[in-house]
């Protein structure tokens, strides 16, 4: 994780988020389910809890992005689209074809975005629990 964190600096993440445009949202929503289905066995089948956390975190971000009953600021949407877009790219800083290590940079980016949107993520969890209870 330390290698990935050094390669993907906060400055690059913030500039990546700033570069997200509304037209980037739909392709991420469209491509995510297929990509997640393809990599889920790798992420959840191993012994590394970090990879299981990555699977759980990207799924939570995706659910937050597609829930039309939950409103969030554009900055949060852009951060989620950036993180999921980075996850979707098989050829990022550490290519995903490299077993296990290929997902460490993805995990670093997703962890930073989770941190950045943590307030909205907590609000989303409350919203989702309330919707299930109703």
Image (cartoon, rainbow, N blue to C red):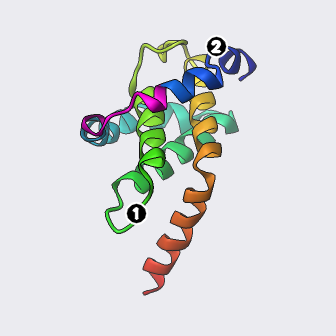
User: In this view, which residue lies farthest toward the right?
Assistant: 2
Seen in the picture, residue 52 relative to 99 is either above or below; the reply is below
> Which residue has dot 1 on it?
71
Question: Is label 2 in a helix, a strand or a loop?
Answer: helix
Nearer the viewer's eye, disc 1 or disc 2? 1
What secondary structure is the magenta-colored segment mainly?
Answer: helix
The magenta segment = 16-24
Q: Kindly report the distance in space between the C-alpha atoms of the residues bearing marks 1 and 2.
A: 32 Å
Disc 2 packing (10 Å; few <14; some 14–19; many ≥20): some
Element at badge 1?
A: loop
Residue 46 appears at what percent x and percent y?
61, 33
Placement of 99 over or under 129, stated as above or below: above
- Which residue is the site of mark 2? 7
Side of 97 where 34 appears, left or right = left
Write down the quadrant of residue 50 in the picture: top right
* Rendered location of residue 133, percent (x, y): 48, 84
Residue 55 numbered mark, or none: none
For marks 1 and 2, the one nearer the N-term is 2
Q: Residue at x 29, y 40 (%)?
A: 22
Near-viewer residue (119 or 55) = 119
Q: Say which quadrant the C terminus sits in.
A: bottom left
- Does residue 23 belong to the magenta stretch? yes
Q: Is residue 75 magenta?
A: no
Residue 42 image offset from top left, x and y in percent: 51, 30
* Left or right: residue 117 compared with residue 18: right
Is 92 placed above or below 13 here? Answer: above
Q: Which is nearer the eye, 109 or 72?
A: 72
132 left or right of 53? left
**Closer to us: 77 or 55:** 77
Q: For mark 1, does the 10 Å Cα neighbourhood hold few (<14), some (14 to 19), or many (20 or more) residues?
A: some
């Amino acid at each position: 994780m330390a290698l990935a964190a050094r390669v993907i600096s906060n400055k690059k993440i913030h500039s990546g988020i700033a570069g997200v445009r509304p037209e980037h949202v739909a392709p991420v929503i469209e491509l995510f389910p297929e990509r997640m289905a393809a990599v889920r066995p790798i992420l959840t089948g191993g012994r590394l809890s970090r990879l299981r956390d990555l699977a759980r975190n990207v799924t939570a971000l995706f659910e937050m992005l597609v829930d039309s009953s939950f409103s969030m600021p554009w900055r949060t949407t852009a951060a989620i689209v950036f993180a999921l877009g980075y996850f979707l790219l098989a050829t990022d800083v550490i290519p995903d074809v490299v077993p296990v290590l290929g997902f460490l940079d993805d995990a670093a980016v997703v962890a930073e975005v989770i941190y950045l949107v943590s307030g909205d993520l907590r609000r989303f969890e409350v919203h989702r629990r309330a919707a299930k209870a109703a």
